Structure formats: structure tokens, C-alpha cells
């Protein structure tokens, strides 16, 4: 049942790419403004807990603040901000109104606003990565691994520069993305763990906390430990920028892997290639005017989302710069990181859905391979001739390929007719001859490599695959 008017929103992430209510609610739990304020309040609670444990705040203060947070609404914080013109002061004022006079002085005690903001951001992006991004990426990864293993022996023509190259297998094509996405997932995990918080005060020198504590760094450590975070080695008024920059970079580079996969699969759906297809629903329409069309809309959508959000990485790099101990030039721009994450999650969901229903056209894959079957053995032929002692094997085979293009003869037949190459064929071993006679055998270790990659990541991510082909 629809509980929000998605069409009253401005961002297409709301009204077009998050129409699933359950999915929207799950993402909103981490990335909405409501979630932002809730996590900022959680940082204030962590401070109160440590102050109480150290004997400064009343022992009842943590329970009071916890109750106040439960009653807090985003709307009242925004109403207060309309008066204060300061978001964190508004949050503190709202919480202070809900607790006793004895507790009030210790809300935000020794803190600066970005002790709260930056720490809350690191906390929410850690939660988002661990509870949303990584599980969904691993689900997509599993889907690709299953396709790769299933198709590990299916011969496909390799393509470089848009031209037919030497044979591979379709499983090997997909295994590229199994490996690339697997490595990106590991990078996200690593950079998520490195997100840090701070509780070092207005310029990061612990000026306020050092008045009360002989060990202000230990105090900071205790506050952040309540949230499962660590402190950066050095902060100013803000957390050092690099951990967040590195984290977002891993998300953008992961998005790029998804876009590359989508583009490859989109190209394989071209009419003149048609080696795979997207599942097409019974009532789905491909074109407003051409009823026969079945456009690769899902893959195109993923590439289009990537085009919209990949450039945001430039803004994140720009946000590494802050004058002296702090300026406000990242205060607006950093608020758009949740949109990037939401777009990434949309792309992941779309690719997971379409990958699970990928249709492989075996006949077209074979037909495309057959197109240049007589030519694709040029590489092994030239290498075998060179190994047999021919002084200019590459040039000899190049001339044969030109001749083959003019005739219906295969390279093998032209070798047999060539006076220059007479005698070389007999020097080839039976297995080497078979590769020239049966180009479909010339796939190197594509199948074995695919299986190795799939099983490597299956072990790392500890998921079960249906490994029967």
C-alpha cells in the first residue's frame, strides 16, 4: 500500500527509482534526513554515557537522553533550526527541552558541531555499507558467479576494438566481472572499516575537553567506542577528509564496474550480435512506435545512472580542501553523498534482477563464432610456424589471411597449397594441428580460469552456488 506521494518529490531517485515501498523504507532508514538527525542524536547520547561513567553527568542522564531521543521528531528540529539558523544547536536545544535541569548542561558538553556531524556521518555510512551496500553487492556477485560457471565451456568469439579476435567462452566473459566486482567489494569492506569519527573540539586540539580531563584523547576514544568507531590520527574542527574520500571512491569505482558490465551486456544484445537477451515481460513495450523492439533498457538505465553520479567524485575530491581548521564549503556538497549511494543501490538491484533472468542465445553465439572461423586461427598458425623455424611467420600468415578473404578457402587449405610453407605442417604435433582444424578448441584455459575465479570468490564470500552445468 502506498503511504507517501512519491510524485510530489523532486529527485527521480524518489519518484522513479525507489518505487518499491519496502526498498525505499530500508534505504531511508540509513540515508534520509530523519536518519541523519537520529544518528546525530546517537552521538550526543554516546557523549552523555561517557560523561556519566566518568562521574561528571548525573547517573540518570543517559536514560533521560535516550528517552528524549525516542520522543524527538525531525520536524521539531527543523522548526528550531528556523530560529537558531544552526542545525546542531537546534538538535541540542530540542533535546535539552526534554530532559531535567540537572542533565541539560551535559548535552553537547565540550563538543563542537562537527564532532557530532562528521562522527554521525561516518557512523551512518558504516551502517549503510555493512547492512545495505555489501549484502546487496554480494547477492549480485553470486548471480554473476553462477552465470560464469554455467557458461564456462560455451564458446564465444572474443572481441577487441569491436572486431572478432580469438575464441574465449561466455563464462570467461562474465568471470571478468566476477573478479572485478569481488575486488571492489573487498575494497568497500576495507574502506568502511577505516571511516573515523572525532571528539576533539572546535579546532581539533581538545581545548575544551582538556579543561576537564587529563587524558582528552582517551575521553574521545571512549565516546567513539560507544558508537563502534575509532578516531582519526589528526582532526581539526572536522574529521580528516581522506577516509571519507577513499570510501566514496570505492563506491564510485564499484559503480563503474557495474556500468562496464551493463555496457558489455547491452552491446551483446545488438540485433547483429544478439547473443544474450533481457527477460521481457508479457505486457512490456520496447518502443512507442516499433512494436517488434526489445530494448536493453535495464542495462542502459544502469549506465545512465552511472553517468549522472560518477562525476560527483570530483566534488568529493574538492571537499578534501578546507581552509585552515574549517570552512563551510563542504556543508552543502557533502549532503549529496546519500543520493550517490541510493543510485548505486538502484543499479545493483536492477542488475541483480536482470542477471538472474539472463537469456543466452546459443545459436547466435555459435553463428557469430562461425562467421570468421576460417580466419581466427591466424594467431596459433603464425606462432606454430615461428616455433617451427619460419623466419617471418607473422608476415606469411598475414598474406594468407588476405588471400582467405578473397576466396572460400580456409587458412589450413592455403597452408597446404603454399610452396613457402610446405613441410611445416608435418612438424606440428597432433594437438597443434587440431587447433588449426577446429578453432573452437583454441580457447586457452578460459574454462579453467573461469572455474578458478568463481570458486575463489565463492570461498571468500562463503555462499553456495548451483555448480551443475
Image (cartoon, rainbow, N blue to C red):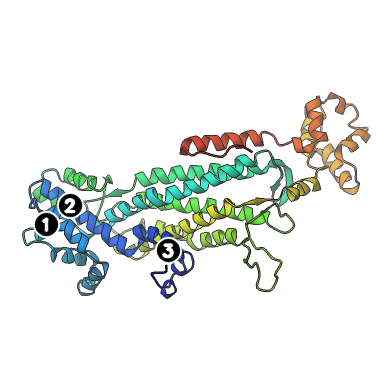
> Is residue 52 found left or right of 430 in the rendered image?
left
Residue behind mark 2: 47
Residue behind mark 1: 106
Helix, strand or loop at disc 1?
helix
Please tell me which residue is depicted at 40% across the width and 52% down the height of the picture. 132
Quarter of the C terminus within the rendering: top right
Quadrant housing residue 324: bottom left
Would you say residue 207 is visible in this rendering?
A: no
Residue 34: x percent and y percent?
30, 63
Name which of mark 1 and mark 2 comes first in the sequence.
2
Residue 29: x percent and y percent?
34, 59
Residue 220, placed above or below residue 271: above
Instruction: Determine whether label 2 and label 3 are within 8 Å by CB.
Output: no
Residue at the far left: name it.
102
Foreground residue, 458 or 319?
458
Instruction: Determine whether label 1 and label 2 are within 8 Å by CB.
Output: yes
Residue behind mark 3: 21
Would you say residue 440 is visible in this rendering?
A: yes
Name which of mark 3 and mark 1 comes first in the sequence.
3
> Is residue 318 found left or right of 36 in the rendered image?
right
> Is residue 404 found left or right of 286 in the rendered image?
right
Closest to the camera, between mark 2 and mark 3, is 3
Please tell me which residue is depicted at 87% across the width and 44% down the height of the picture. 404
Helix, strand or loop at disc 2?
helix
Helix, strand or loop at disc 3?
helix
Instruction: Determine whether label 3 and label 1 are within 8 Å by CB.
Output: no
Name which of mark 2 and mark 3 comes first in the sequence.
3
Foreground residue, 214 or 98?
98
**Distance between the Cα atoms at labels 3 and 1?**
39 Å
Quadrant housing residue 225: top left
Amino acid at each position: 500500500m502506498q503511504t507517501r506521494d512519491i510524485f510530489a518529490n523532486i529527485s527521480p531517485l524518489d519518484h522513479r527509482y525507489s518505487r518499491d515501498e519496502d526498498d525505499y523504507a530500508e534505504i531511508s532508514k540509513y540515508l534520509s534526513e530523519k536518519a541523519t538527525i537520529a544518528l546525530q542524536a546517537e552521538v550526543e547520547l554516546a557523549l552523555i554515557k561517557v560523561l556519566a561513567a566518568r562521574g561528571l553527568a548525573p547517573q540518570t542522564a543517559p536514560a533521560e537522553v535516550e528517552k528524549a531521543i525516542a520522543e524527538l521528531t525531525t520536524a521539531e528540529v527543523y522548526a528550531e533550526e528556523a530560529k537558531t539558523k544552526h542545525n546542531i544547536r537546534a538538535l541540542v536545544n530540542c533535546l535539552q527541552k526534554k530532559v531535567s535541569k540537572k542533565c541539560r548542561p551535559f548535552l553537547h558538553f565540550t563538543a563542537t558541531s562537527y564532532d557530532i556531524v562528521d562522527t554521525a556521518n561516518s557512523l551512518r555510512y558504516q551502517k549503510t555499507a555493512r547492512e545495505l551496500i555489501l549484502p546487496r553487492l554480494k547477492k549480485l556477485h553470486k548471480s554473476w558467479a553462477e552465470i560464469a560457471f554455467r557458461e564456462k565451456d560455451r564458446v564465444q568469439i572474443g572481441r577487441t576494438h569491436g572486431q572478432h579476435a580469438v575464441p574465449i567462452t561466455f563464462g570467461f566473459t562474465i568471470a571478468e566481472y566476477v573478479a572485478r566486482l569481488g575486488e571492489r567489494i573487498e575494497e568497500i569492506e576495507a574502506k568502511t572499516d577505516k571511516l573515523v569519527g572525532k571528539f576533539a573540539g572546535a579546532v581539533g586540539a581538545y581545548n575544551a575537553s582538556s579543561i576537564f580531563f587529563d587524558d582528552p584523547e582517551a575521553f574521545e576514544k571512549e565516546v567513539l567506542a560507544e558508537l563502534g568507531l575509532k578516531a582519526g590520527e589528526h582532526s581539526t574542527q572536522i574529521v580528516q577528509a581522506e577516509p571519507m574520500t577513499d570510501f566514496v571512491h570505492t563506491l564510485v569505482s564499484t559503480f563503474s564496474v557495474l556500468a562496464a558490465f551493463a555496457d558489455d551486456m547491452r552491446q551483446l544484445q545488438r540485433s547483429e550480435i544478439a547473443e544474450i537477451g533481457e527477460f521481457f515481460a508479457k505486457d512490456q513495450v520496447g518502443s512507442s512506435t516499433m512494436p517488434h523492439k526489445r530494448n536493453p533498457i535495464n542495462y542502459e538505465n544502469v549506465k545512465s545512472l552511472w553517468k549522472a553520479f560518477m562525476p560527483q567524485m570530483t566534488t568529493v575530491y574538492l571537499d578534501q580542501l578546507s581552509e585552515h581548521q574549517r570552512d563551510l564549503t563542504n556543508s552543502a556538497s557533502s549532503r549529496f553523498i546519500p543520493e550517490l549511494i541510493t543510485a548505486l543501490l538502484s543499479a545493483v538491484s536492477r542488475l541483480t534482477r536482470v542477471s538472474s533472468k539472463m537469456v543466452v542465445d546459443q545459436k547466435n553465439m555459435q553463428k557469430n563464432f562461425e562467421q570468421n572461423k576460417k580466419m581466427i586461427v591466424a594467431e596459433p598458425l603464425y606462432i606454430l610456424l615461428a616455433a617451427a623455424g619460419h623466419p617471418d611467420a607473422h608476415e606469411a600468415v598475414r598474406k594468407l589471411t588476405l588471400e582467405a578473404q578473397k576466396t572460400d578457402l580456409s587458412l589450413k587449405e592455403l597452408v597446404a597449397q603454399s610452396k613457402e610453407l610446405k613441410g611445416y605442417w608435418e612438424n606440428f604435433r597432433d594437438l597443434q594441428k587440431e587447433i588449426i582444424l577446429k578453432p573452437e578448441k583454441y580457447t586457452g584455459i578460459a574454462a579453467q580460469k573461469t572455474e578458478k575465479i568463481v570458486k575463489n570468490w565463492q570461498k571468500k564470500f562463503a555462499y553456495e552456488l548451483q555448480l551443475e552445468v
